[in-house]
Amino acid sequence: MVNSNGNLVKDNEALLPIANRGFAYGDALFETIRVNSGEILFWEDHYFRLMASMRILRMQIPMKFTPEFLEKEIKDLIKINDLDEISVRIKITVYRDAPGLYTPTSNEVNYIISASKLETSFYTLSEEKNEVTLFKDHYVVADLISTLKTTNKITNVLAGIFAKENGFDNCLLLNSNKMVIEATNGNLFLVKGNTIKTPPLEDGCLKGILRTQLLRILEKLEDYVVEEGSISPFELQKADELFITNVISGITPITNFRKKEYTTTTSKRLLGILNSRIRLGA
């Protein structure tokens, strides 16, 4: 079952008209959320990112879109799908629901919430090889829109296809200034000595929820120097560690880039701290 604008319907009955603006123009955004045994992780950050994104896209935010309303919608959907005792991936998609071509006749919205089962209750560190390469066929424009989770993600799609066709596990995306900004499915962190660096939002990387959580954690760890700064492709091979973050999988170490192999010491430490905060409800 999915929640289609407040109505619970079977997955194959949640149909959208061909004129749907999310389909026709990518005039939509989405929020991907992890829920562990009925507890929505980082809900406040997700909610405020969703509201801020809607404002930036000039969508009309419904009066009923309070944190309490959306939280209840999520939990009701989880319960009706018998997923309330396990970990769940929730996806909220908000699309502008109006006639028109490029210019809509109004800014009113509708929404869809879907739920799917996750395999692990907490974040785990993969021991599998994760070899990446740079995706140079297309670049991300470094602007505010690029930091949002809109349905305009064709560069990520093409990068994923490129990785698959060429025997890589992932690709790193570049912005129009040829700086490395993120992976196809998450934010990028670079470790060199006791310095941990991640691209700034000004470079066009996604304003990731787990990126935000890790920056908060790192602020309190005195043995690390944290930097939000541009990362050039040349820095990748000088790093001790590279890892990718997203709210569903947590922290995913990069094992290889070109001839460079990376360690996972910092990744493991940060993952332990992250999981302990989740257990404590922090």
Image (cartoon, rainbow, N blue to C red):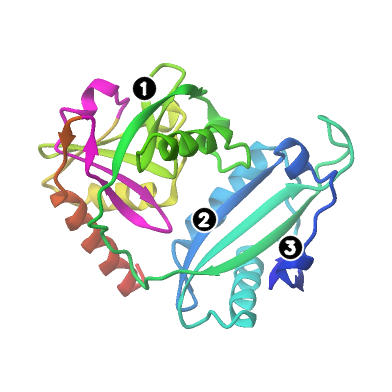
User: Residue at the location (27% across, 58% down)?
Assistant: 126
What's the magenta region?
229-258
Badge number at residue 46: 2
Q: Mark 1 packing: few (<14 Cα in 10 Å), some, or many (20+)?
A: many
Where residue 132 sits in the image (x, y, percent)?
A: 31, 37
Residue 22: quadrant of the picture:
top right
The three-letter amino acid code for the residue at tag 3 is: Lys
The Cα atoms of the two marked residues, 1 and 2, are separated by 27 Å
Secondary structure of residue under mark 3 = loop
Residue corresponding to mark 1: 179
Q: Which of 260 and 60 is in front in this view?
A: 260
Is residue 149 a member of the stretch shown in magenta? no
Camera-side residue: 153 or 213?
Answer: 153
Q: Do the residues labelled 1 and 2 touch (CB within 8 Å)?
A: no
Q: Residues within 10 Å of mark 2 (few under 14, many from 20)?
A: some
Q: Which residue shows up at 76% across the image and 46% down it?
A: 60
Earlier sequence position, callout 1 versus callout 2: 2
Closer to the eye: label 3 or 1: 1
Q: Is residue 39 left or right of residue 23?
A: left
In space, the residues marked 3 and 2 are separated at their CA atoms by 17 Å
Image quarter of residue 67: bottom right
Q: Which of marks 3 and 1 is nearer the N terminus?
A: 3
Q: Which amino acid does label 1 sit on?
A: Met
**Which label sits on residue 64?**
3
From the viewer's perspective, is residue 27 above or below residue 17? above
Quarter in which the N terminus is drawn: bottom right
